[in-house]
Amino acid sequence: MQSFEITHWGKQILVIPLGKMEFKLYYNDELIASITNQLNAGRSYWSSPNLDASEANLLGSIITSKLY
């Protein structure tokens, strides 16, 4: 999978895939977050050590919409 850009709050964020549903996010060549899609009790959710849960899920939804 190739890297791609998403727009969030008017900012162009570079998304670099690392593995299956695991990504690094960069803004102005600076790493801003790593984000992973996980399953818990049959439900999918996004998590990141750099973001709160709601922000991770929002960015994950934007990423998912670009992939599919």
Image: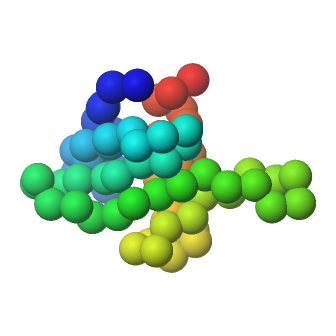
Residue 16 found in image quarter: top left
The one of 5 and 23 positioned closer to us in this rendering: 23
Whether 28 is drawn above or below 55: the answer is above
Q: Is residue 35 left or right of residue 39?
A: left
Q: Position of residue 24 (x, y in %)?
A: 34, 52
Residue 62 in sight here = no
Q: Is residue 3 above or below residue 52?
A: above
Q: Quadrant of the C terminus?
A: top right
Q: How is the image coloured?
A: rainbow
Residue 46 in the image: above or below residue 22: below
Farthest front residue?
19
Visible in this render: residue 37? yes
Q: Is residue 45 left or right of residue 60?
A: right
Choose between 68 and 19: the one closer to the eye: 19
**Which residue sits at x=40%, y=25%?**
1
Q: Position of residue 17 (x, y in %)?
A: 39, 39
Q: Estimate the x, y position of residue 49 in percent, counting from the top left.
A: 46, 74
**Residue at x-position 49% and y-position 48%:** 22
Residue for point 67% across, 55% down? 38
Count of marks, rendered view = 0
- In the rendered image, the residue lying farthest to the left is 28
Q: Position of residue 29 (x, y in %)?
A: 11, 53
